[in-house]
Amino acid sequence: MNNIIEIDGHKAVVSLDPDIGMLRGEFLGLNGGADFYAESISALREEGAISLKVFLEMCREKGISPYRQFSGRFNVRLAPETHEAAVLAAKAAQKSLNEWVSDVIEDAATNR
């Protein structure tokens, strides 16, 4: 099970690494890896802050942007039946398939 926490204004996914019996955090939206481990949530937050600081400092030193750029486009493959159902749902909502999918994703992503 994954959870998202916020550390210094940056979101990170937290999961359990069963091989080492520790919590693992990984920042989202960064242009590289900045993961961190700890045995408790409070320690994970501390390790995350350290990892983030080191990552951002390295990016500054190298003159690269620390943030991943998103184009706003992606492809998705669906079962033909699901594709048909989505087209019908979009038509029923008087939207294009793109508008409908965008609205559904936005709603799901912002109402966690």
Image (spheres, helix red, strand yellow):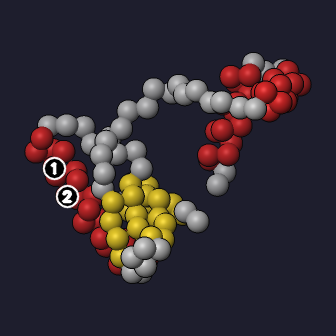
Determine the residue positioned at 62% across, 30% down: 76
Q: Is disc 1 surrounded by few (<14), some (14 to 19) or many (20+) residues within 10 Å?
A: few
In the displayed structure, 25 sits above or below 34; it is below
Q: Amino acid at mark 2?
A: Val
- The answer to whether 87 appears left or right of 102 in the picture is right
Q: In what element is the residue under mark 2?
A: helix
- The answer to whether 72 appears left or right of 34 in the picture is right
The residue beneath circle 2 is 54
In front of the other: 83 or 12: 83
Q: Amino acid at mark 1?
A: Met
The reply to whether residue 2 is visible in this rendering is yes
Residue 56, percent from left and from top: 22, 51
Q: Are marks 1 and 2 in contact (CB under 8 Å)?
A: yes
Q: Quadrant of the N terminus?
A: bottom right
In the displayed structure, 28 sits above or below 69; it is below
User: Can you tell which mark lies on residue 58?
Assistant: 1
- The answer to whether 3 appears left or right of 22 in the picture is right
Q: Quadrant of residue 106?
A: top right
